[in-house]
Amino acid sequence: MRIEHLSLQNFRNYARLEISLPEGPILLHGANAQGKTSLLEAIYYLATSRSPYTTSDRQLINWNADQDLLPFAKIGAEVVTTSRALNRIEITLTEANGGLNGARLNKEIRVNGVSRRVMDLIGQINVVMFLPQDMALIEGAPAERRRYMNVTLCQTDAEYCQALATFDKVLTQRNALLRRIADSDGSPDELAFWDDQLTESGAVLVAGRQRLLRELEVKARQIHRDLSGNEEDLELCYQPGFMPTANNTGQLSFDVLGLDLNRQLDAGAIAGQFRERLGETVGEEIARGMTLIGPQRDELRLLFNGHDLGLYGSRGQTRTAVMALKLAELEWMRDVVGEWPILLLDEVIAELDAARRAYLLDRIDGANQVLLTTTEPEIFTAEFLQRATRWEVRQGQIVTVSPASS
Amino acid sequence: MSKAVPQSVTQLIEAFSRLPGVGPKTASRLTYYLLRAPDEMTQTLAAALVDLKTKTRYCSVCFNITEDDPCPICADSGRDATQVVVVEEPLDVLAVERTGAYQGRYHVLHGAISPVEGIGPEDLKIRELVERVQKEGVLEVIVATNPGMEGDATAMYLQRQLAPTGVKTTRLARGLPTGGDLEYVDSITLLRALQGRHEI
């Protein structure tokens, strides 16, 4: 899979950009704050309809456009896949006057000129992005890891994506109802519908996450062995938030429910168990006015040789594990989708030592398209620089283009 | 607004812009249009606005908006009193009426269950429906709430409340729009249509 043409209008610091993208590696270089990362962000945004850097889409609109009567940003790409013909994908963000509620942001998605919903974007473009802040996957809060699982699965699994949207809505409604019941404004028998929806959609999330992590683990473990010279064993330990943990150690006591996380569970079995546990917790949930168990509390721990990396890992070990996880994700997506996703590497190369840099570049060699950003192109080998197309980015423009010489 | 505009004009512009779908521009246009319109027109409009609130009320049977109680549909002895279609809003009654295929009666809930908006079952005309079913010899309740999460929550709550009365409770089928193109239908709608398929 690769992008053949990219067009940006009022996106971040790009007032206007129309550029064709060749196959193979594209190296974006230039000083800081010139727009290298924004270009990767635009591609990521087209694939997932969200930014890896910000939760507010408004920030994506070029601030010079703010002066305009109707500020807007437009991102479009022509994508070629090995199996299908060319697809044109376009997202337009428009600031609309929302009357009393202040300004609203309209997001319009078009695929081949036809207006589509966010859900229909799934699978149009697949990307895997490497970021320096991926370290937060291990060092950060559990929400980071849930977000990681969601974004990865939403790119490939429409059913998961649908369940996630339903789950979020149900959770908000159920929490509101629990607060109403706590205030004696509602009665517990109103919970039945929301409990059904919560456990049904929640079970799809748990099953999807479990499957993803089992498949990632096999690949990540092998890559991690390669990287660490066969010394350490990497494990992805999934802790579903609806299951009881033994004395708050974070360790799961599987036998409590008779569920075996080493086997793939189906959503039906999970929904039943989840429902049962929900029944036991409902008293406390009403007292606290919120849903206490479920995938919104899922956790993923990375272990090496049985030790928790988030707690005991050194910076180097963490970096190695993150790289193994991301490379595993790349290969997982390639297997699921049936072709290489587009790879986006933001500044990660500079943080690696020569051996790992070589390993990474070798591992992604099969990809149809790789976009890398760097402030120092010197760190790449002459051989790589020869193969790569080099773009110099300056103030929201691509000023020089040096095509690959081979 | 500037002092060049008289108070009475400003007042109407502001009143208009509070209406749904009307922005400040449309509000000004409507106001200046009325300013130039014949007196008769503004008086009719004013009278209509007053009547809207003073002459209408809820029908004591079905809770639709009506001038006469019971409403014309409930008062019509030609309509089947054993069938009741339950809808969220009065406008939904019109939608079902437009099909011309329904000869039973209605029940308007005035909303759907949504804890986030603070709407619980007691805020809707659900208790009244259950009483009606118990008293009036209703044989079938057709739940026609919107096919979204809140509508579904309301439907399920209704079903549980109505179960003890033994009345037959049905829900509108969901599926493909007439004249639609299968390839452009979203997957959830198609899935529902597949689940709800029937023999031909």
Image (tube, coloured by chain):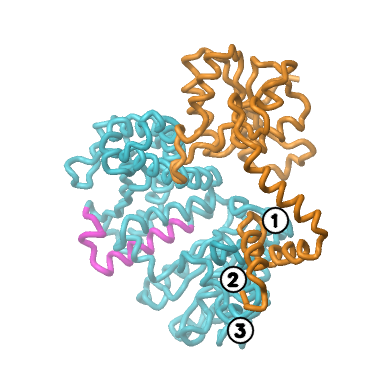
Image coordinates for residue A124, horizontal then vertical, percent: 62, 56
Q: Is residue A344 depicted above or below A203 in this figure? A: below
Alpha-carbon distance for marks 1 and 2?
Answer: 31 Å
The type of residue carrying mark 3 is: Ile
Q: Which residues are magenta?
A: A307-330
Task: Tell me the crowding category of disc 1: few under 14, some 14 to 19, or many 20 or more residues within 10 angstroms, Cα based.
Answer: few
As rendered, which of B174 and B16 lies closer to the eye?
A: B16
| Same chain check for tags 2 and 3 | yes
Q: In the drawing, does residue A70 fall left or right of residue A312?
A: right
Q: Is residue A108 depicted above or below B114 in this figure? A: below
Comparing marks 1 and 2, which lies closer to the viewer? 1
**Chain depicted in orange:** B
Q: Are marks 2 and 3 in contact (CB under 8 Å)?
A: no
Image coordinates for residue B73, horizontal then vertical, percent: 70, 25
Q: Quadrant of the C terminus of chain B?
A: top right
Quickly name the residue at label 2.
A24
Quickly name the residue at label 1.
A115
Quickly name the residue at label 3.
A398
- The numbered mark, 2 or 3, whose residue comes first in the sequence reads 2
Q: Colour of chain A?
A: cyan
The residue lying at 22 percent from left, 59 percent from top is: A311
Alpha-carbon distance for marks 1 and 3?
Answer: 30 Å
Q: Quadrant of residue B15?
A: bottom right
Q: Quadrant of residue A84?
A: bottom right
Image coordinates for residue A333, horizontal then vertical, percent: 51, 54
Q: Quadrant of the N terminus of chain B?
A: bottom right
As rendered, which of A183 and A385 lies closer to the eye?
A: A183
The residue lying at 41 percent from left, 53 percent from top is: A219
- The numbered mark, 1 or 2, whose residue comes first in the sequence reads 2
